[in-house]
Amino acid sequence: MDKKSVFRSNLLKRRKTLGLTQEQLASCLNVSPQAVSKWENTSYPDCELLPRLAGELNTSLDSLFGVNIIDSERDIEQLVDDEMRCTPPDERAEKFMRIMYTALCACNPSNDTVGRLHDSYEHETYAGLKTDRELAVSRLSADLRYFCFLEVPENGVNSYFGDTTNMVRLFNTLADESAISIISYLGASVRNKMFSVEMISEKLDIPLEKVQHIIDRLDRFGLVWRVSADIADKPVILYGYTHQIPLTLILVLAKTITNYLKYMDPNIEEWTQGAFRRENGEQDEVVPQVPWWQEGEL
């Protein structure tokens, strides 16, 4: 494909990716729709229009002309920023997962090909990364995809825990099936919707006293917020759900932990110690690895 054809193809593809019509792009550049049509079929824009055209399409001239520049000083953050900003909102999650999956696969020292997220998976499939510096787990199946990454601190994750009393209280709360039902019900609500304990009890067929007990515990964690209202001259307490992101991830990851993770793509394990550290700073001696085959060894 010649350079003109590459430019026209990239211009057309970029315009459609952004959901712009020829008329809309023309309006941004103060040219006629016929001019945009010519650029996509028979001619180049004037030189002074090229930077403005690239700017309106939120891309670079190199990209429009199909020039691949290998630069050790390239700004990776800027490239990701440009890519995500020009991605339509309904396609952003898919783009994010593909970027994260490729980044994870690039940590695999035994594979030098670009990791590309598949469009579908026959089985429930995960990806895992475990090194001395980072941990990651990702579910790849399209019915529910996620990517969780942890940069392992030098002193280990346990140094962050401190007093674990509230952690135990949270896990004791979540150990109740009714609590998970209540959280799921509240979490399905729209923003700022309020609930009474009586309504939750009726909807989920859970005894009123148990609902109140669970709601009070969630309130102490800041997972629900309460307001007082006078309805028909009677004081009523109503609760709203805060839609806390970590709680959603905790429940999703709990399901992952209890699954048998049979299918992993990829599963990268390049580590000598776990993410926890002993408080006194002691470390186990590294278990020596069996040396790899020497050249010529039979």
Image (cartoon, rainbow, N blue to C red):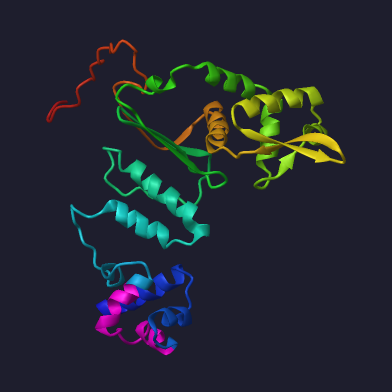
Q: Is residue 57 at all visible to an observer of this figure?
A: yes
- Residue 219, quarter of picture: top right
> Furthest-front residue in view?
233
Q: Nearer the viewer, residue 285 or 245?
A: 245
- The picture places residue 255, in percent across and down from the top left corner, at 57, 31
Q: Is residue 58 above or below residue 240?
A: below
- Picture residue at 23% right of the left edge, 16% below the top: 288
- The picture places residue 180, in percent across and down from the top left corner, at 66, 30
- Residue 221, quarter of picture: top right
Helix, strand or loop: magenta stretch: helix
Q: Is residue 169 above or below residue 179?
A: above
Q: Is residue 89 magenta?
A: no
**Extent of the magenta region:** 34-54
Callout count: 0
* Left or right: 149 in relation to 262: left
- The picture places residue 144, in percent across and down from the top left corner, at 55, 44
Q: Nearer the viewer, residue 34 or 126?
A: 34
* Left or right: 185 in relation to 291: right
Q: Is residue 259 at all visible to an observer of this figure?
A: no
Quarter of the image where the N terminus is located: bottom left
Q: Is residue 53 magenta?
A: yes
Quarter of the image where the C terminus is located: top left
> Furthest-right residue in view?
232
- Picture residue at 34% right of the left edge, 42% below the top: 105
- Picture residue at 36% right of the left edge, 67% below the top: 58
- The picture places residue 242, in percent across and down from the top left corner, at 61, 39
Q: Nearer the viewer, residue 68 or 27?
A: 27
